Amino acid sequence: MKKFEGFERGMGIGGWLTNYKRFNVLPMDKRLELTIGDYEHFDSYITEWDIINIKNMGFDHIRLGFDQIVLEESPFTYRERTMALVEGFVDLCEKHGMGIVLNLHKCIGNYCDIEESVTLFDSNELQERFIALWLELERRFSSKGAVAFELLNEVRDIEPSLWNDLAERTINAIRAINKTRKIIVGPTCWNNPNKLHALKVFDDENVIYTFHVYDPSEFTHQRGVLHWTKLYYNRSLTYPCDDIERYRDYYMLLFNNDKAYSHIERMDINYMREILENAISFMRANPDKILWCGEFGTIRHADMASRENWMRDVIKILKENGIPYSVWNYLSTPNDGNRFSLVDDDTRHILSERMLKIIRGDDVE
């Protein structure tokens, strides 16, 4: 089994250059603008102390999410102020021996949480800007071999061939100037492991494949304000859960349909094994490739014991199958509608020592 050297156990950083505010509440004509407040936030939110803190917690890499509009001032023109922040962050990660995944979290035309009038896959110009942004990042980080490029976070539920084509074009453009850059691609439908079978597998040993885990979303996103179903249901759920009726109620109330859960006797590790079976099947079918779980977590207001239990089961399955991972998320801004943070807002110390042991893989039995 191939190893993702230097990227065995990571921590995602959102809330800094992505999810710093929620665009779904902004007027359409304000969504692609940056304000003075945005820049003040970018300049102060994450520092060298945070990199050291993450390293001291036992992680070997950081997955840094950023939005296209944070780095791109206008088509094919880039913001030196924010580019300098990313460059400085990479230098600090290198200084402290941390691997770094640069993750385009939200690009123009593919915001995972809002609708847009023109999508990435409808516009040749947006696709050219997408490729050009990655070429600009390759130019800036050409000497940084410990930096991996994750092309796009959570492609929507589209025809997979559209994403396969754009991913291939982007990889080919990067390969024209760097043959060894680690490039990460995931499937459609928000990096759903069920869609891995439709993801193009490249004849390239430096392409890594990824997926996300948030099932059951009724638990991981419970009472979240960004999904109307969770907000409407407005009920706390636990994990594991012997009383599966609490989950069936969700479907009955919203859709008058409980078929999705009619076969489940418990919400526990057996359920999670079913969810992850497609990822494991992808590994079996592609033993010479690396599969990395780039994102998984639970909303912060879920009860801590349930958060710990869910995390334990996911990581246990990942470790059983030799799948490296990066957990979501270090820190969230107070106005983030889906706060998945694992550290205290003020002290930035881990909210639960048991959770930290679980994430490190020390307590997953």
Image (cartoon, helix red, strand yellow):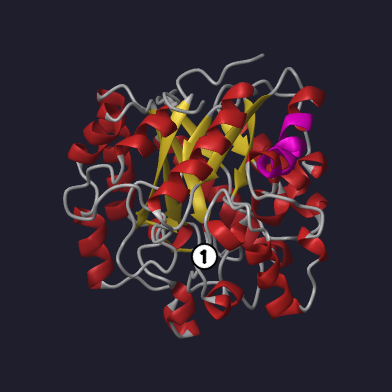
The reply to whether residue 177 is visible in this rendering is: no
Q: In the rendered view, does 236 fall on the left or right side of 161?
A: left
Please give the name of the residue rendered at 60% of the width and 46% of the height, measured from the top-left corner: 213
The reply to whether residue 252 is visible in this rendering is: yes
Query: Circle 1 is placed at which residue position?
Result: 222
Task: State whether residue 256 is above or below residue 259.
Answer: below
Please give the name of the residue rendered at 23% of the width and 40% of the height, measured from the top-left corner: 50
Please give the name of the residue rendered at 72% of the width and 40% of the height, measured from the top-left corner: 168
The image quadrant where one finds the N terminus is top right
Q: Name the magenta segment's main secondary structure.
A: helix
What is the crowding at mark 1: few (fewer than 14 residues within 10 Å), some, or many (at least 20)? Answer: many
Q: Secondary structure at mark 1?
A: loop
Task: State whether residue 276 is above or below residue 1.
Answer: below
Q: Amino acid at mark 1?
A: Gln
Residue 304 in picture, x, y percent from top left = 39, 51
The residue closer to the viewer here, 82 or 330, is 330
Residue 132 in picture, x, y percent from top left = 55, 49
Please give the name of the residue rendered at 18% of the width and 38% of the height, measured from the top-left corner: 49
The residue closer to the viewer here, 70 or 322, is 322
Q: In the rendered view, does 327 fall on the left or right side of 155?
A: left
Q: In the rendered view, does 337 fall on the left or right side of 191?
A: left
Boundaries of the magenta span: 271-281
State which quadrant residue 147 falls in: top left
The residue closer to the viewer here, 153 or 326, is 326
Q: In the rendered view, does 324 fall on the left or right side of 19?
A: right
State which quadrant residue 41 falls in: bottom left
Residue 351 in picture, x, y percent from top left = 29, 46
Residue 262 in picture, x, y percent from top left = 81, 60
